[in-house]
Image (tube, coloured by chain):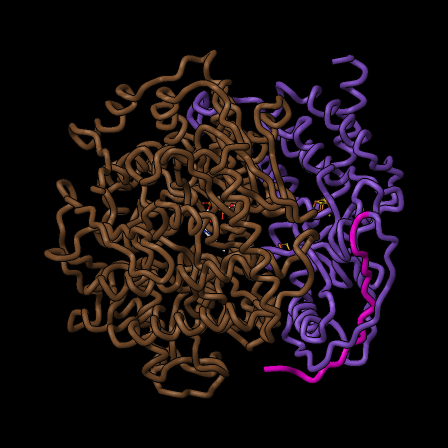
Amino acid sequence: MTLDSKIPAGPLSEKWDRHKFNLKLVNPSNKRRYDVIIVGTGLAGASAAASLAELGYNVKTFCFQDSPRRAHSIAAQGGINAAKNYRNDGDSVYRLFYDTVKGGDYRAREANVHRLAQVSVNIIDQCVAQGVPFAREYGGLLDNRSFGGAQVSRTFYARGQTGQQLLLGAYSAMNRQIGTGMVKSFTRHEMLELVMVDGQARGIIARDLVTGEIERHSAHAVVLCTGGYGNVFYLTTYARGSNGTAIWRAHKKGAFFGNPCFTQIHPTCIPVSGDHQSKLTLMSESLRNDGRIWVPKKKDDARRPADIPEEERDYYLERIYPSFGNLVPRDIASRAAKGMCDKGFGVGTTKLAVYLDFKDAIQRLGQKAVEAKYGNLFDMYKQITGEDPYSSPMMIYPAVHYTMGGLWVDYNLMTTVPGLYACGEANFSDHGANRLGASALMQGLADGYFVLPYTIGDYLASEERKPVSNDSPEFMEAEKQVKDRLNKLLSIKGKKTVHEYHRELGLLMWEHCGMGRTATGLTEGINKIKALREEFWQNLLVPGVDLELNQNLEKAGRVADFLELGELMMHDALNRNESCGGHFREEYQTPEGEALRDDENYCYVAAWEYKGENQMEELHKEQLTFDEVHLTQRSYK
Amino acid sequence: MSGNMNITLKVWRQKNKSDAGRFETYQAKHISPDMSFLEMMDVMNEQLIKDGKDPVAFDHDCREGICGMCSMYINGRAHGPNKGVTTCQLHMRSFKSGDTIVVEPWRASAFPVLKDLIVDRAAFDRIQQAGGFVGINTGSAPDANSIPIQKHLAEEAFNAAACIGCGACVAACKNSSAMLFMSAKVSQYALLPQGQPERKLRVLNMMKAHEEAGFGACTNTEACEAECPKGISVTNIARLNRDFVAASFTGE
Ligand SMILES: Cc1cc2nc3c(=O)[nH]c(=O)nc-3n(C[C@H](O)[C@H](O)[C@H](O)COP(=O)(O)OP(=O)(O)OC[C@H]3O[C@@H](n4cnc5c(N)ncnc54)[C@H](O)[C@@H]3O)c2cc1C
Ligand code: SF4
Ligand code: FES
């Protein structure tokens, strides 16, 4: 099979408009004859559900939490980008496009990124009209802040809770459609299998997480908006339930997986404090607007930060990257922090932390102003660590935060399985090898409000308008597969709990496929993960039965999938003999230690095809071309 | 790294909706004061699994105080002893070694227990579906800066919109009223120009859904505000009441 990205012809800035005109339309009175399943109700899923229902399609949504409002988008803190140029500081659709392509280290599609920048402006309009309470200035107009990787202020925000407010906006639009009966919402339901009929996606098998019953749901198209798979690393900024099961099941049914090894390690998180820890908490990147990052100039300096005089501090980001300073992109800031700690300059009891200091900001702006901007983040920090960031600097360290990889999709957001779409963090996305801050919220809402509602019609217009049966042999077979798998997990009755396996997997991934990767480390990692997977299926202990609320059984299925997905990530990282964005292969770096791309050989999207249990997957390449933003080494100096 | 705190837990156990339920006592040993309350529960559950017992089911997801999923009634208080935090943000340093801690689910007839500490909060969603939105379709919005909004109103709307839908207000209320939760949404829109066209209809529809869901009436005890982890103010309830009276009179 050859990959067709379906990028429309014509000049970059006209591609999307032309494409929209060329897409087939579904007659308004026929829309209600089509059923669409949307799995996931985060920004991508909720916005898609509301918009498709407004158009007249019958929508069913699924989420594993008890309410659509609790999707992990709720936790996004810092903000959402849009090329509004309300600040008159030189922003434009083209600049947002340019920054995003460059920030992604030239591993994203130009056409997609340009479309994203174009619709970014509509997102803000839409959200304000929904009553999203964005931050405002005294004149009553919207406020902006700047984020890493940009020299303009284009980030819209709602205190430190932007994701919450955007999600509640999308949730409210979806609720309106639930009220009219156009959306049927299934909460505490988990998708466990994709159903294919005659080569097309025709439904899902889901488990009711309260009763444990297995259900068959059919539709004319299926949209996966299930978020990122970063929890393969165990300790991350994700919610505990975030998982890769839906996209992994779809992958095994034929959807190619794009750039699985592209993961984002966020530079400003609260460091690990002990092995009881269940998650890491992000301290928003917006803090880098006013906080200054430093380590002592002396190795193993045991003094309290306040006792270290100014001239003995190394503000290393400002030193190495004078023009972007503390606002360099995330991959660069993370690697620099790791570099400092590896060299022995780390602080705190574990020596795996650097300081993020607000002393100067408090002096310059006053404590009140700092509190108004970052109060909730400071409180959160204090709550977790027991220390007060107003009086002594925060300690931070990088942590896994986002996955740029995901299901490969074409320009229409369709996967390689006809009728199966992926939106939001679940697709391989527009962020290339590194996502800029405040652009995931933008992408999720762009996909759901402004792209999918157009492109899905093009597919549905050629589909028969009769309901899809959920009694076909394909549905029965998929249901049986799911039940067999659950029974298998329950029947092992070994000695180790699923949490123990998850933690072990996480350590293994962090060590071999984390911030610094090498060919030998990855090869070793692949062997280890295979062994761990084998052990898992022989020695797992899951309490309880299937027909009940059983949280360990839920988690066991997710960890089983991570054990396979993790291996693919390592194969992908091993294949990519270059460094780009968040993917850093230690063998490939510039003399200054920056990522060294190999555009000659790796300027492509790696799209992996599943070939069967324990078989090596097949690599397909989608070559990327850069007509507008010329391939150069990124410089933030 | 484990610590040296030893805790006795009295936990509500209930197999499913129809089971009567009872307290069971467990020991949590080698607890570190840096652990969160939920991490302590994780440690206890791992031990229960190893002992061949059924672990305690509880709701949680983000573990950073924003998703509203966690919901424990700890020593007679929704989300435990500290003000302004959710259960997942509570740390063991707020307790002493040797303490006995009683853990129960939210108790309200509109929130039936599904298992152990997990309750069904679907009634909250139904209230929002009845009117918790601005009735506009995707694509029809004017430019975001076409309507200036006074900063203090935007901030007040934000304060109301910060509700995480956890249900602590209902659990804390002797009438099991969801007025604080509902008033937060009603206020957010009542304060903003975008919310005006449907202002009356919204409050009437949401009040109706509140009653149908089986939540009690508000008798102004203000226990809700005291236990709300997000500091949602009871002034929102006053605003809701004013709007409700006005809407009922004009019969819209
Ligand atoms: C702490 C934090 C802060 C962030 N801050 C920012 C920021 O400031 N700006 C920014 O742009 N981005 C930020 N991000 C990234 C951004 O929040 C996410 O990438 C984005 O919200 C993902 O949205 P989504 O709709 O794709 O998925 P999610 O919001 O993760 O939603 C996933 C949905 O899928 C459902 N689901 C998953 N699996 C299944 C299954 N098998 N069956 C049924 N349902 C399933 C879940 O129930 C949920 O409804 C942040 C991320 C984190 C973790
Ligand atoms: S008002 Fe407060 S206590 Fe009630 S649901 Fe909202 S956040 Fe929770
Ligand atoms: S787990 Fe999300 S608020 Fe507690």
Boundaries of the magenta span? B1-17
Report if residue A161 is visible in the image: no
Residue at image x 28%, y 35%?
A: A411
In depth, the one of B166 and A287 nearer the eye is B166
Q: Residue at x 53, y 40 (%)?
A: A476
Q: Position of residue A455 (x, y in %)?
A: 35, 28
The extreme front residue here reads A473
Q: Is residue B3 within the magenta segment? A: yes
Quadrant assignment for ligand 3: bottom right
Colour chain A is painted in: brown
Asked whether A548 falls inside the magenta stretch, the response is no
User: Does A385 sit left or right of B78 as displayed?
Assistant: left
Q: Nearer the viewer, residue B145 or A614?
A: A614
Is residue A147 left or right of B100 when viewed as pictured?
A: left
* Colour seen for chain B: purple
In percent of width and height, residue A96 lies at: 28, 41
What percent of the width, then of the height, locates residue A573? 28, 64
Left or right side of B24 for A610: left
